[in-house]
Image: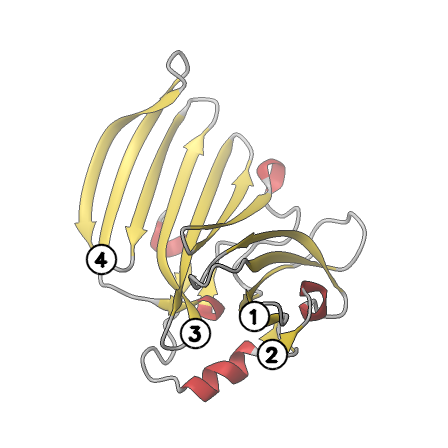
Amino acid sequence: MKLAATIQFAVLLLGTVLYQGSQAQQSLVLGKKMPATAPALRDFVPPGWMIESQVSGDLNGDGVADIAAVLVEGKGAADDRQRGLIVLQANAGKGYSLLGSNGKLLQCQGCGGVKDGVNVAIKNGVLVVSQYSGSREYSVYTWRFRLDAASQRLQMIGIDEEDADGMLGKGSTVSTNLLTGQQISESYQYDEKRDRKVILGSKKSKIAKSLGWLEDVVGNQ
């Protein structure tokens, strides 16, 4: 699979969106009007949705733990339920503010096959979102977002794709840094004896620098 064909993201009004306009957009969670601030994560969860997973970490460098949560639509254990992502900024003991949300990034629950799964982490001020899908042949997509201080919105700064055949132990990766425009493509063979990937080939290239907001990113569905 090609990265350009499987992942689409739009840069909408980049550099021209007024702060007031961005705040209005951020008050929408998965298409529903929600409070800009509230005491707890549960207060931002839209009716008919529930929390699938959540993580904490500092996104703005103030030493207070912020929250990123994966939401799932509906109740029970049925597959094909839509997933969504919301990110909250902690307000020093005064609840949380909504930093951003996305209902187009993650595949629906169970739609990724045997390896279906989503992992979210906050590392060194960066929100890292990974999605897994497939079975013997599988894919892993990882998106990275960082808070833009001027707009107080989350920008996508990098994206990685891995496609592999678990039986043959062969795979390829494409890692793109959207801040520098550098893209690294590699092929590998997994070495069972040494329990690591052996790089067979590597290529570096340059792409246009392009930063999009969290709300605008469309994932591989």
Is residue 1 something one can see in this rendering? no
Front: mark 2 or 4? 2
Q: First in sequence: mark 1 or mark 4?
A: 1
Circle 4 packing at 10 Å, graded few (<14), some (14-19), many (20+), is some
Near-viewer residue (20 or 141): 20
Residue that numbered label 3 is attached to: 152
Q: Position of residue 154 (x, y in %)?
A: 43, 67
Is residue 15 something one can see in this rendering? yes
Label 2 and label 4: CA atoms lie apart by 33 Å
Q: First in sequence: mark 2 or mark 3?
A: 2
Label 1 and label 2: CA atoms lie apart by 12 Å
Front: mark 3 or 4? 3
Residue at 54% x, 42% y is 133
In the shown orientation, is residue 118 left or right of residue 79? left
Residue that numbered label 1 is attached to: 91
Q: What is the three-letter code of the residue carrying label 1?
A: Asn
In the shown orientation, is residue 35 left or right of residue 66? right
Near-viewer residue (215 or 65): 65
Circle 2 packing at 10 Å, graded few (<14), some (14-19), many (20+), is some
Front: mark 1 or 2? 1
Q: Position of residue 45 (x, y in %)?
A: 70, 67
**Which residue is at the far top?**
193
Q: Quadrant of the N terminus?
A: top left
Label 1 and label 4: CA atoms lie apart by 32 Å
Residue that numbered label 4 is attached to: 180
Q: Position of residue 121 (x, y in %)?
A: 51, 49
Asked if the residues shown at circle 1 and circle 4 are in contact, with their CB atoms under 8 angstroms apart, the answer is no
Q: What is the three-letter code of the residue carrying label 2?
A: Ala
Residue that numbered label 2 is attached to: 36
Residue at 53% x, 84% y is 24
Residue at 46% x, 60% y is 59
Label 3 and label 4: CA atoms lie apart by 21 Å
